[in-house]
Each structure stands twice: as structure tokens, then as C-alpha cells.
Amino acid sequence: MKPQQIVYPEDKLIRAYYNRHPTARFLPIDLDDPNPHFVRAFALRQLKIMRAQRVPEDVALRVVEMEATEEERAATEAERLGKPFTRRLTPKHKLATGRIEQVQEEEELAWAETKRERFEQMEAKRAKAEEDRAAVAAAEEKAREEGSGSGGDAEGEVEGDAAEGDEDEKKGKRPSAKAPASPR
């Protein structure tokens, strides 16, 4: 004869919790902890509200979920401040993210790094361009000062440019403006 299965009143609520939060099945259970696992504590609290207030399962669920949300907020605040906090209705451990989430997080970090590097490159190019513009402006200013101080060399420069053009013309580098147009 087969032994009878032991069923507790909160078992149905525990199964419902795992159906709502399937990843909670993968969270570790501390066997040395005198307190019940957070899923069992959640179900026991829900059962207690159902019996004490004579309310249906869904109403008790909303009440306990609000308590769990408040507990999570308080635990996060205590962790931020470095104070100890004992959780009853929420998990003590964080479940490692799935492989897809991990890859997405790595891609986000790589993207942010690439964006930062590109920004730094653009800033370096902008700074170099600004330096080049300043150097060109300084050279032009210096040339203007030298040109205005020497007197009438401006005409000599133009003639020199024309002489250079004639040399290019002789070498066949560019056509002469004096050359006759080709017949069509």
C-alpha cells in the first residue's frame, strides 16, 4: 500500500506563486536558515490574511504583494545605507541574468565605450581644426603686417605670379589664356 501524500494548506498558494514567477524556482534555498523560504513565507502570509480577514485569494494576494513591494523598497534603502535588513517576503539573492540579457548588457557597454571614443576623437579633431585656424589666421596677420610695412611689393608679387604661369605654360602644364581657341 502506498503512503498518503502530505498536503499543506499553503501548497496551492506556493504553486500559484511559482506559476506567476517561474524564475523564483531557480533561486537558492538556505537550508541553515531558521526562517522559511521567501515563497513559503509569502504563501503563509497570504493564507493568514485570507483566514483572518475572510477575503478571497486574489484580494489577499494584492495585499501581500504590496507588503512585498514595500519590503523590497526598504531592503534596497537599507542596502544603500549599509544597514542590515531581514527579508521575509522577497528573495535575498538576485538571480543571475540570462545569457541574452548578459549579451545585451555587454553590447550596451561596448556601444557606450565606442560612443565615448568617437566623441573624444571628434573633440580632438575639433581642437586640432581650431588650432589650425588660429595658426592660419596668425600667419595671414603676420603676412599683412609684413606686406604693409615693405611698401609697393604687392605689384611685384602679381608680376611674379604671372611669370610663374608663363613657365607652367612653356612646360605644357596648363594651356595659355593667349592661345587661340581650337576650331570646331
Image (spheres, rainbow, N blue to C red):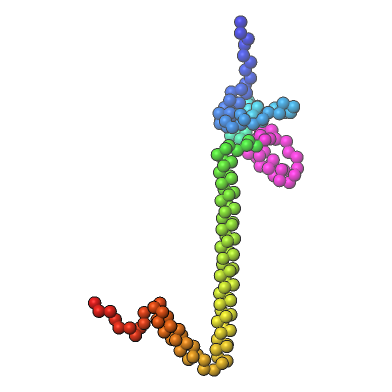
**Does 140 appear in magenta?**
no
Front position in the image: 125 or 45: 125
Front position in the image: 134 or 58: 134
Among all residues in the image, which is located at the extreme left? 184
Among all residues in the image, which is located at the extreme front? 171
Q: Residue at x 67, y 35 (%)?
A: 93
Q: Residue at x 58, y 28 (%)?
A: 18
Q: Position of residue 96 (x, y in %)?
A: 62, 37
Front position in the image: 72 or 156: 156
Instruction: Identify the image quadrant of the C terminus.
Output: bottom left
Q: Position of residue 68 (x, y in %)?
A: 64, 36
Q: Position of residue 21 (x, y in %)?
A: 58, 32
Q: Can residue 48 be seen from the camera position used here?
A: no
**Relative to residue 181, is residue 72 drawn left or right?**
right
The quadrant where residue 88 appears? top right
Residues in magenta, as a range? 68-93
Q: Residue at x 41, y 79 (%)?
A: 171
The quadrant where residue 16 appears? top right
Q: Can residue 25 be seen from the camera position used here?
A: yes
154 w.r.t. 41: above or below: below
**Relative to residue 14, is residue 160 drawn left or right?**
left
Q: Position of residue 183 (x, y in %)?
A: 25, 79
Q: Residue at x 56, y 77 (%)?
A: 136
Front position in the image: 104 or 78: 104
138 w.r.t. 30: above or below: below
